[in-house]
Image: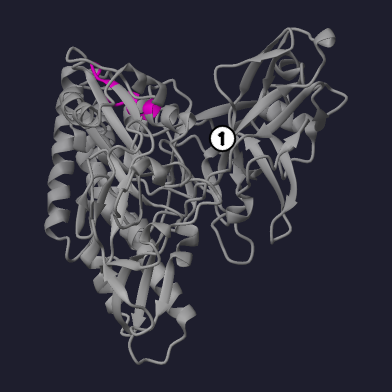
Amino acid sequence: MKTDLLKYDASSLQELLMRKLIESGLYEDQIYPGSDTRILIDLFSWTFNILTYILNNNAANAIFDDAEVYENLNKIVKLLSYKPHSYKTSYCEFILNYLGSSSEASTFSCTIPKFASISTGKTDKWGNEIYYSFIKNYTFNVINGIISTDENPVLYNGRYMRYTFDGITQGREYELFIMNGISPNNNHPQYIDTEGISVFYEKIDNNGIQTFKEIKIVDNLILDAGPNDLVCEMRLNENYELTFKFGNNIHGKTLEEGGTLHVVYLVSNCDEGIIDSGEINTSEISLKIGNISSLSELIKMCYGGIEDFLLNYGTIFSKNNLPLVSINSLNIANISNSSGVLDYETVEEIKNNAPSAFRIGNRLVTSSDFRTYILTSFPSIIDDVYVCNNVEYCTGFYKWLDKYNSFDISIRSENYKYANACDFNNVYLWLKPKYDGEITKIDKNNILSKCENIKQLTINLVPCNAIKTYVTPFIKYKNFDISELTENIFSSSYVSPVKIFIIKNGENISNGTVKVNVSNIIVNYFKNISLLGEKINVQEILNSIYALGYVEDVKTVLVSEEANGELIYENGLSFISFTESLVEFQDYEIFNNSKQFEKFQYPELLNKDSFVSLIEVVNDTSYILKNKEF
């Protein structure tokens, strides 16, 4: 029989070798991690995987580069044990408020269960109501009217649905189930966030007694499951469908014959589910899962029955007021705008991420390992990350602070660690967000939690917010003082003293079109700077403006009172950069050529949403321009 060796990756080869040894009856200790036989199998399997990778890499022109269809590339990267990420829905941090009076204040503990949902009162363009849902239990205490909790709850946009697989379980090794018909489409999108997936196994015994068991989802059956663990491995296949793979009584428990599988999943409202701060302010929580009409069945499947349910969640829910309840004296409100959404991983993203993820090999040792892992694991929230050790932190970050007389213990108030040379185990993660604002505490905790599982034991991870440095057009004038600029630069009434003058050639094009096109070039240039420590190349921006074909000249002009009625200008573009936090604007620099940022910095264009107001289109003979004087 011809054997197709290319269908094996490290995990499947491990499975094959261990199964053959068990069937032979000669060897048994390979089922125990750390045994000599198991170590030899692991070494052989991963060596085979590396050689397969080298083969694929050498044939990249025929495979990776030429694979432009998602279906093909999804199958190829399965050889590397790579799982393309699925859709990521919007999420938001919420707070609980106690509304009772001090005289009515009571003391109690309360748990809101996963699968509970909160309505926004709005509907999306498809007519679906917009909900935010709990993907895990959330417990808090009320002590004399004051709410005590370790962290605020994070709710994810979407409403829960149930999918029941056709047919019954067969009790086979590595049994595979595919959720058919749930892939996204244009008419009725079913965008599923896998963060909210739960799998349940239903069995009816000979006496007609129905039982449900929840099946834990693990990253890898081989690495994360023992013979008695009721677990499964989940992967997004080439048709955007979720597949669930179960064990073989060695790596995960084999499903019993004659059972039924149910999947509870979270369906996102896509972009329609994004909300602003304060849009949810309610005391009502609902407990309902689509495709489950019986409330008793829902409670039995998801919570172990009504007795267990009331024992754990009876403070909020009771038998008489389900599925919609109003929490007495408590209110739930979102304290920030919800995050954006992230679409399914594209072909180009898979090409970039899969080889890097394979090289990591499920361990974090080098700075490159950490950076690759964070970028591929959190693509919806992290734009870039700079990873450094304690020496680089002290000699780089501290040196930058000291340069502007800002190095003291007060940096703790900005959530930066005040370290010393003896903190040699620290690894610092400088995180640049994909969205406006800073990385939230919840996102930081998620990143640390994932990294903790596969990092070196001696490493202490320290998350840091990458430092945002603002950039705006500017010309230095006589008697310039940075405090005059920064005193009200962030106020809504601030008017920039500097404009960008665009002089057209003879082309017949409207001034409004010129302003918009030039503004878009500058705004998009800064928007596309996704990496930390990059350089601003002003000449590159100018080349793009001149490439429009109807721009003859560009000047940065001072038009405020400091010019004494004259137009003082700089040929081309001139900018000023400054950092608001930590150094209090003392790092300001005016430049018209290039600007190199520190490895932990990134530029943000000031007033980017209204930048077009800084651009004026003039005729070359309309103004008498004077060079700047000092």
The count of marks equals 1
Q: Residue furthest front?
A: 564
Question: In which quarter of the view is residue 579 placed?
Answer: top left
Q: Identify the colour scheme used.
A: one colour
Can residue 409 be seen here? The reply is yes
Q: Position of residue 70 (x, y in %)?
A: 37, 62
Residue carrying label 1: 199
Q: Position of residue 291 (x, y in %)?
A: 72, 45
Q: Is residue 463 left or right of residue 361?
A: right
Q: Is residue 221 left or right of residue 209?
A: left
Residue drawn at x 48%, y 26% is 230
Write the start and end of the magenta stretch as one range: 448-460
Can residue 69 be seen here? The reply is no
Q: Nearer the viewer, residue 559 or 433?
A: 559
Question: In which quarter of the view is residue 423 placed?
Answer: top left
**Quadrant of the image containing the C terminus:** bottom left
Q: Nearer the viewer, residue 176 or 478?
A: 478
Q: Is residue 265 left or right of residue 24?
A: right
- Whether 6 is drawn above or below 456: the answer is below
Q: Amino acid at mark 1?
A: Val
Residue drawn at x 26%, y 52% is 590
Q: Position of residue 73 (x, y in %)?
A: 32, 59
